[in-house]
Image (cartoon, rainbow, N blue to C red):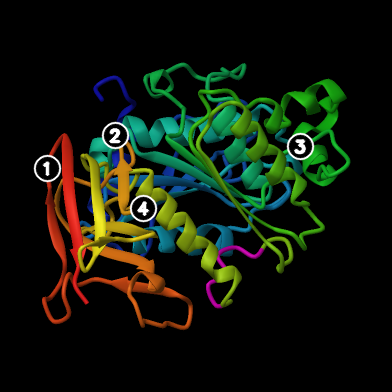
Amino acid sequence: MSRFPSLFRLAVLFLASAVHAAEPAKVPLWPDGAPGAKGQEDKDQPFIYAWPAAKETATKAAFIVCPGGGYGGLAADHEGVQVARWFNGIGVSAFVLHYRLGTQGYHYPIQLMDVQRAIRHVRANAAQYGIDPNRIGVIGFSAGGHLSSMAATLFDEKPEGMTNDAVDQVSARPDVAAPTYAVISMIDDFAHMGSRKNLLGPNDSDELARKVSTHLRVTPQTPPTFLFQTDEDTVVPAENAVNFYLACRKNGVPAELHCYKPGPHGVGLYLGDPVLGTWSGHLRDWLRNQGFLNPAERAAVTGKLTVNGKPVSWGNVVFSAEDPSAPVAGVRVRGGNFKLDAKAGPVVGKIKLRVSYSAADVPGLDTPDGTVTATEQKAGSGEWTVEIKPGDNKLDLNVER
C-alpha cells in the first residue's frame, strides 16, 4: 500500500469508515486521473459505488456490478443499486461500476480498461474492504453483461494507455462471472448493433467486432460462469447466452444457463415476478455450491440408503450444513447405493440430512407424486444429522417407517 497515491489511501480509509453508512462510498478508480480521460467530470473519470456487506452477515465474497445501457447510458438503479442491495442481502459486498460510455466519446478498449481496473482495485484493497481476494466475481446486464464477459475472457489483455501502477500489477481475472441477458456477439445476425456502434465508435470494423465477440474468446482459463436469459427477449436474443454457454462447454469451463420463456429485455432482478423473480435464487444457489460464498472444506462419502432395512430402488440424499452460505451436496441413490467424491461431497462438520425415495419401496404406501421425503430417521426422532469428517466417510442410512 505504501506505493499507492495518498489520495487513493484516503479513499480506501473513508470507505472502511462508511461500512454501515446509509449511502455507499464513491471511490475513483484512478484518483490522479483516468488514462485517456477527456475531462474531470464523472463521465470522464470512472468510479465505483461501494456497498460493503454488513459485518454480521458478510461472507467475505464480492461482486463488481456492471449496469447495462447499450454502452450509451447506465441503468444504474435496477441493474446497479438494486443488484448491490440484493448481494448485500446474501452477505456479499458489491461495487457498482460507472464505466465510460461511447456516447461520451469513449470507445474500446477504454471500457475493458475500466472493468479491469475495478476488479484490480477491489482485489488490491481486499483487506481494507474485508473481503477475500480470491472470491471476486463480476456480473453485468445487457451491454454491461458484454463488459462482464470481456472481463471473464480478456483479463490478460493490457489495453494501450493503462497506467501500470501498483494496482495494475494485480490480477484482473474474476473468480466467477454472471453475464445477464448479455450482449455477447458483435458479428452475428443476433448481435446488438447499437452496442457495437457505441463500443467501437469510429474504429468499427469486422475484425475488431470479432475480437470483442466474447463467445469466440472463451478459453479453459475463463472463470466459472452463470447465465440468465429469456426466450422472448428480442433486443438481445437468447443466441447470445447460448453461444457463450456452448463455448464454455467446449473449453471445459463450469457453466450454468437459465433461459426462461417469458420476459422482455432488461428486467433486472424482477423480484416481484413469481417466475422471472426466481432467477436470482438460482444464482445464489450456484454461488453457494461453487464454494464462492463459503469455501468450506468438503469430504467424500459413500453409503447405503435403506427403508426398514431394505435398499431403496431409487432416490437421493441431500447434505446441508448449518451455515446457509456453505455448499449443499446432493447425490442420486440407485439400488440403495450412493457415492460422492471430495469435490462434490458435503462440507466437513455437523450436517443435516434429507432423503427422498420411491413410495413403491414401502408396501401399501401411496403418495400423490410417488415420492417420500424424510428429514427424520424415524418419525418423532427429531432432526436427522451426521458428522462428516475430513477424508472418506462411509454412511449407513436407514429410514424407519
- Residue bearing mark 1: 389
- Amino acid beneath label 4: Gly
Looking at the image, can residue 350 be seen? Answer: yes
- Amino acid beneath label 3: Ser
Earlier sequence position, callout 3 versus callout 4: 3
Tag on residue 185? 3
Magenta residue span: 267-272
Depicted 307 relative to depicted 397: above or below: below
Q: Which residue is pictured at 33% across the width and 30% down the height?
A: 124
Give the secondary structure at mark 2.
helix
Earlier sequence position, callout 2 versus callout 1: 2
Give the secondary structure at mark 3.
loop
- Residue bearing mark 4: 335
- Residue bearing mark 2: 9
Earlier sequence position, callout 4 versus callout 1: 4
Looking at the rendered image, the quarter that the N terminus falls into is top left
Which circle, 4 or 2, is nearer the viewer? 4
Q: Point out residue 279 in the picture as x, y percentages from the top left corner.
A: 54, 62
Q: Point out residue 313 in the picture as x, y percentages from the top left corner.
A: 38, 59
Earlier sequence position, callout 2 versus callout 3: 2
Dominant secondary structure of the residues highlighted in magenta in the image:
loop
Q: CA distance from mark 4 to mark 1?
A: 25 Å
Which circle, 2 or 3, is nearer the viewer? 3
Whether 269 is among the magenta residues is yes
